[in-house]
Image (cartoon, grey):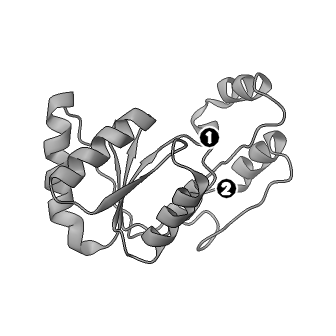
Amino acid sequence: MFDMGFEPQVMRIMDNVRPDRQTVMFSATFPRQMEALARRILTKPIEVQVGGRSVVCKEVEQNVVVLEDEQKFLKLLELLGLYQNQGSTIVFVDKQENADILLKDLMKHGYNCMSLHGGIDQFDRDSTIVDFKNGKVKLLVIIIHLHLCSLNIFFFMASKIFLYN
């Protein structure tokens, strides 16, 4: 958002949140200009870099499909059917309640999946991450709150990521 002209708005938000917060930033590219801006708002930042700096991955394909709410689940089932044999998949939702509802609906349709959110105890969250990492579970429903630090690792473990909002 910084490089798209939203720096003043982002800085205003950052000035109004608790100083003891945990902040996670991630980007497909992270040019030097972005790094300088990020260092202004982060305390003791740790950088994880995969591939070259400011290099866009050629294998990433992004598609946007705008649907009415009642069409979303059927479209998700269609996409999962197309891609289920191509590796692990993450479906992002906006709320814990929606994660639980989607998890139940996917399980009713025969998908072996798990969810990951703050309403699950730490042992179960750790177990879910291990199962997903090891390929025991290939479909994960997760909330897209940026304060989930574990979010970063999923981008390297999933071959397909869907935003279900």
Q: Is residue 38 left or right of residue 125?
A: right
Residue 133 place in picture, x, y as percent: 47, 73
Which quadrant would the C terminus be assigned to in this image? top left
Which of the two discs, 1 and 2, labels the residue nearer the N terminus? 1
Numbered tag placed on residue 42 in the rendering: none
Q: Nearer the viewer, residue 50 or 129?
A: 129
Residue 57 place in picture, x, y as percent: 47, 68
Q: How many labels does the image show?
A: 2
- Which residue does the image show at 75% across and 45% down from the upper left? 38
Q: Name the residue under label 1.
A: 3
Which quadrant would the N terminus be assigned to in this image? top right
SS for callout 2: loop
Q: Mark 2 points at which residue?
A: 31
- Say above or below: 86 vs 79: below
- Say above or below: 132 vs 39: below
Residue 145 place in picture, x, y as percent: 54, 40
Residue 162 place in picture, x, y as percent: 33, 51
- Which residue does the image show at 58% across and 74% down from the upper left? 51
Q: Is residue 65 left or right of residue 126?
A: left
Which amino acid type corresponds to the residue marked 1 in the rendered image? Asp
- Which residue does the image show at 41% across and 66% down from the upper left? 158
- Say above or below: 70 vs 137: above
- Say above or below: 88 vs 145: below
**How many residues crowd mark 2 within 10 Å: few (<14), some (14–19), many (20+)?**
few
Report if residue 59 is visible in the image: yes
Proximity of marks 1 and 2: CB atoms separated by less than 8 Å: yes
**How many residues crowd mark 1 within 10 Å: few (<14), some (14–19), many (20+)?**
few
Q: Distance between the residues labelled 1 and 2?
A: 10 Å
